Amino acid sequence: MVKEHGSVVRPALIIAVGSLGIVTMTTLIVMMPMAVDAQPGTAPVIEEGQRVRLVERDAAGLEARDYQNIDTTRQLGELQLSDTPAEALAESDDLAGLVARVNDAARVVLAADSFGACERALEEAIEYAGVREQFGRVVASFQAVKHMCAETFAELEPLRSLGWYAAFAWDEQRDDAARTVALLKAHSAEVSTRSVMATTQVYGGMGFTWECNQQLWFKRVGYNRQALGGPVAERARALSL
């Protein structure tokens, strides 16, 4: 809700994907309007009078707060606004479509982030299996470990192609872009989860500790899985598009 003179009068909550340190160093913040809950597959519903607005970082009534979250490599937080001056940007003929498009771009980024985390987790697991010895031989020589790594690789590679196409479809604004992004987000969530579970097990019990980098990739994939829609919600959205 915005006053006529352009101030945000209702406290607004924004979950920032990224370090709040970056927010504190920036000069201007772009505030997207919040969408009202809609049925899966339908365009976001934007309240009348909402606009994309620009807020100065040191504006009165703007407060940044850190969240304590499990993934310490990507700190989350909130921007709390109370009677904060804001400059309205140019109006859009399809504001709901703009919000949906921005959300889809974020979903592609989250899927790519999960893929990269899984790829690195697999590389590290293979390196570890090549030097860790058990029963007088490296664990990489055990058939079970070989199959675990090979099956993880085989499941990840198609995700790369799906991610490239989803990004292309979004960029070219193809008719199937929104549906493809939804399918990417859902498939990425499930494949990534299975991938990091497998690579963590290559390490044995150590894989679940903070002494092993696998916990970093595991936590990142866990957050990305639910952000902007879990696999069930995204598949339902894809079916109705």
Image (cartoon, rainbow, N blue to C red):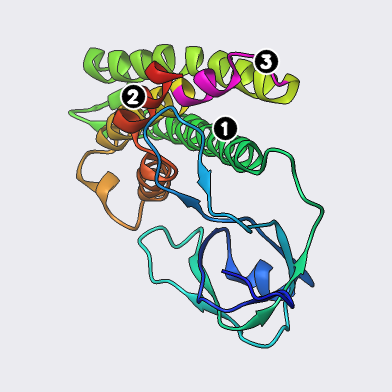
Q: Which residue is mark 3?
A: 174
Nearer the observer, disc 2 or disc 1? Answer: 2
Percent of width and height locating residue 219: 37, 49
Circle on res. 236: 2
Magenta span covers which residues? 173-182
Q: Can residue 191 be seen?
A: no
Q: Whole-percent x and y of residue 74?
A: 51, 58
- Residue 20 on image: x %, y %: 59, 70
Amino acid, disc 3: Arg
Instruction: Out of 95 and 217, give the one closest to the viewer.
Output: 95
Q: Earlier in the sequence, mark 2 or mark 1?
A: 1
In the rendered view of the protein, which quadrant contains the N terminus?
bottom right
Q: What secondary structure characterizes most of the magenta part?
A: helix
**Residue 72 in magenta stretch:** no
Q: Residue flagged by tag 1: what amino acid is it?
A: Val
The answer to whether residue 159 is left or right of residue 85 is left
* Badge 3 element: loop
Mark 2 vs mark 1, CA separation in Å: 17 Å
| 103 relative to 68, above or below | above
Of pointers 1 and 3, the one earlier in the residue sequence:
1
Q: Which residue is mark 1?
A: 108
**Residue at 33% across / 32% down in the picture?**
233
Q: Amino acid at mark 2?
A: Ala
- Mark 1 or mark 3: which is in front? 3
Q: Residue at x 34, y 36 (%)?
A: 230
